[in-house]
Amino acid sequence: MPNLGELASYLVGLVTDAIGSSEMRLGAVPTVAILIVLLVLLSLIARPEARWSGKGLGGLGRVGRVMALAAESGADATISLGSAGISRGASATERFQTLAALPLVGYVADAAARAGVPLRVTTNDPVAAVLAQATLAGAHRRTATPERASAAAIEYVGDGRAAAAAFALATARPHGVAMVAGGLAEDAMLVLDGVLGDAEWSVGATASASQAAGPLLDGDGSLIGPELFQAAAEISARGHARTAVLAANRLIWGAIGLLLAGSLITWAGGTEVAAFLTGR
């Protein structure tokens, strides 16, 4: 099995051979062009690093910090699973949004459990309520905080979109952290205003294109369209898979840096980097 030096040597040699056999003798521009092509190929193979950067999606990377601030101020956290539900007579796309919101609930619940912040999840669908209850229980198992489970509650607000909107407006009050995630329709602005309106930090997430303006206007962060499903997929990724991809990305960027440095040194007539790495 080749060692890291031999692998790097092969990569540097591949680039230098490509440059040496190329008829593009225009100076540094062709060299940079070849390196960019390699960069694109490597990125496509291992997927870009942004794929695993949850902080760029809706500002979800700030949840831990804002939850800590909520704990210091004695505030609570609230989540609404939208108004589509799972067993209600909504479209399949809207019901799927409710399922995609559950990993986000688990992510926020993890932060709330660690910080000791009371969390309330509201839904207008009984099946979604059962799934949300299991999600909260899983969060307390993952964070080893079973003593704080009583601070988390699931509230079924009644069936129908009107019930979700009315409950959101009737119970509107300041929150430390607030989130609306799931399918929304004509009730979107009412639900968003009631849940997110007075929160210190809030995020709205929906894949309903017709309601994209609501999360953008009411939330500090937003997940619009496919971002809802992308965030759910990233949060649901297992820890070792995430670590492996991050490690692979760093190795690739290291190889790219070595390619750039070695190619430029060789091109300038300096030391043969490939021979140096392999000890020849």
Image: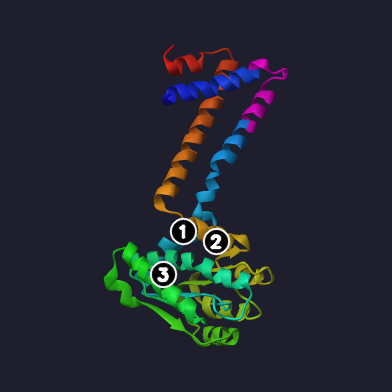
> Which disc is residue 236 wearing?
1
Q: Is residue 249 above or below residue 276?
A: below
Question: Local crowd at mark 2 within 10 Å, few (<14), some, or many (≥20)?
Answer: many
Q: Is residue 69 above or below residue 90?
A: above
Q: Amino acid at mark 3?
A: Thr
Q: Which type of secondary structure does the marked residue at label 3 adopt? A: helix
Sequence order check: which comes first, mark 2 or mark 3?
Answer: 2
Q: Disc 2 and disc 3: Cα gap in Å?
A: 21 Å
Q: Which type of secondary structure does the marked residue at label 1 adopt? A: helix
How many marks overall?
A: 3
Kindly report the secondary structure that dominates the magenta region of the rendered protein. Answer: helix
Tell me which segment is drawn in magenta: 20-37
Classify the position of the C terminus by image quarter: top left
Disc 3: which residue: 135
Classify the position of the N terminus by image quarter: top left
Disc 2: which residue: 58
